[in-house]
Image (cartoon, coloured by chain):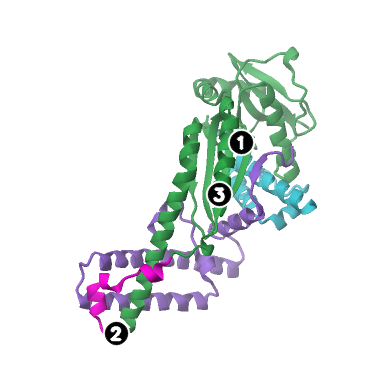
Amino acid sequence: MNDVITKSKDVTLLEILDRILNKGVVIAGDIVISVADIDLVYLGLKLLLSSVETMEKYRGAPIYSPYQEPS
Amino acid sequence: MNDDKIILKSESIDEIAEELEKVENALPNRINADPEKVEHGLAKLVLTLIELIRKLMEKQAMRRIESDSLTEEEIERLGETLMKLENKMDELKEIFGLKDEDLNLNLGPLGDLM
Amino acid sequence: MKNYKCIYAILDSNVNGSDHKPDIMGLDSSSVYFVGYRNISAAISDVNRDTIKISSDIAFSYEKIIENLWVKYNLLPMRFGSVVKSNANIIEILKRNYANFIDNLKKVENKSEFGLKILWDMNKTDFNTEKTFNLDNYKKLKKLNKNSIYRNYLIDKLKQHKSEDSFMKKIDDIIEEIHSPLKRLSYLYKVKKIVTPKIILNATYLVKNDMKDEFIQKIRQIKEEKKNIQFLLTGPWPSYNFVKISIK
């Protein structure tokens, strides 16, 4: 039973990530602080396509900051 | 809100995650600084492209045979060329330790060409 | 220091002002509030820039914030990571893209998005190509020396390609059978055919709210009829897939 719930949650997460990382309204231009769009999208795709098992790794743990400190 | 976004699902929804993972293997990997990995990544990319071209040529050849526009000699030569190409491809795959799945491309709209 | 503003959505009304403050917590434990321009607003909250990094918890939180707003307002969801420095920036964005926002808000008003993924295991289907393949149709090929390895190679290849052609045709037929009735029940749709041995369709539909039940019912019905195909239907979602606009 737990297994089914876990997998449902993982599938929902994949669906959410696809939407919030790859879709929706995008702001371009210098008015926005530079968010590494390409990295976000790439990361989004990678997370989206992770297998159900590896989703466990990302649960709760921040893994990536899109901002680069200015050098 | 967790899983109440799923309205309808068939028994094995984890299969979908597995399938998506296969599609992932077709996406180009991030450029890696590690030289060994770079080589392998490039080999995979190059071979994937060659394989794509080979498959397109094969498809084209089948169409020509179907259209009956070739002579017997031409057909025989075509068979020889295609077979040698495929064998060469198998050799290259072995050398770089790549399998068919590694070179599988999700072509999206181009899928119809295959 | 929470000196950045994270934008969650563009709303269909000017709900500036303290009496419209929603009781929603933003990503960095600061309340969501609104910044308006004419008859639209942006829903934002103050954040620390380090907060805006993706994780499963943050993904769920971000979606939840948008869904909570969606209960009350027609909106355009923002892509994750839409961050600016000041309220002035926000007003600038609303101003520059006003017409675009108005058009899109109108488009998605009173509608919800549904995602449908379909899998069909082709490996479990036999196409009978062995039996249907007739070498007589290929006279010249047939005439070649029976011992020629190239002749036999070509025959195998032809069979393989014929099988693939049947496969592609079958997929198109199935997609048509499933998508046609759904097309009619939706306002807008996006359909992507993905061909691997299993997955075949990734579709999103924008459905009017008063058609939601009928839409879902239709899919249930199709699922019942097509027992050898797997379905995953998710939703209702705010219209992420139908507002993919890049703004200045």
Colour in which chain C is drawn: green
The residue at 41%/77% (across/down) is: B88
Going from N to C along the chain, the mark reached first, 1 or 2, is 1
Identity of the amino acid at label 1?
A: Arg
* Crowd class of label 3 (few under 14; some 14 to 19; many from 20; radius 10 Å): many
Determine if the magenta segment contains residue C136: yes
Which chain is assigned cyan? A
Q: Which chain is purple?
A: B
Query: Image height check: is C216 above or below B80?
Result: above
Tell me the amino acid under the disc marked 2: Lys
Mark 3 vs mark 1, foreground winner is 3
Separation of marks 2 and 3 at Cα, in angstroms? 44 Å
| Image spot of residue C176 (x, y percent) | 44, 45
Query: What amino acid is labelled 3 in the image?
Result: Ile
Please report the residue visible at 55 percent of the width from the left and 19 percent of the height from the top. Answer: C95
Q: Is C87 positioned to the left or the right of C130 in the image?
A: right
Give the residue number, with chain letter if any, for mark 2.
C146
Magenta range: C128-145
**Of C221 and B57, the residue lying toward us:** C221
Residue B67 rendering spot, x and y as whole percentages: 24, 64
Residue at image mark 1: C79
| B18 is higher (above) or lower (below) than B55 | above
Q: Position of residue C60 (x, y in %)?
A: 72, 39
Whether residue A70 is situated above or below residue B28 in the rendered picture: above
Asked if labels 2 and 3 share a chain, the reply is yes
Horizontal and vertical percent position of residue A12: 68, 44
Q: Are marks 3 and 1 in contact (CB under 8 Å)?
A: no
Q: Which residue is mark 3?
A: C118
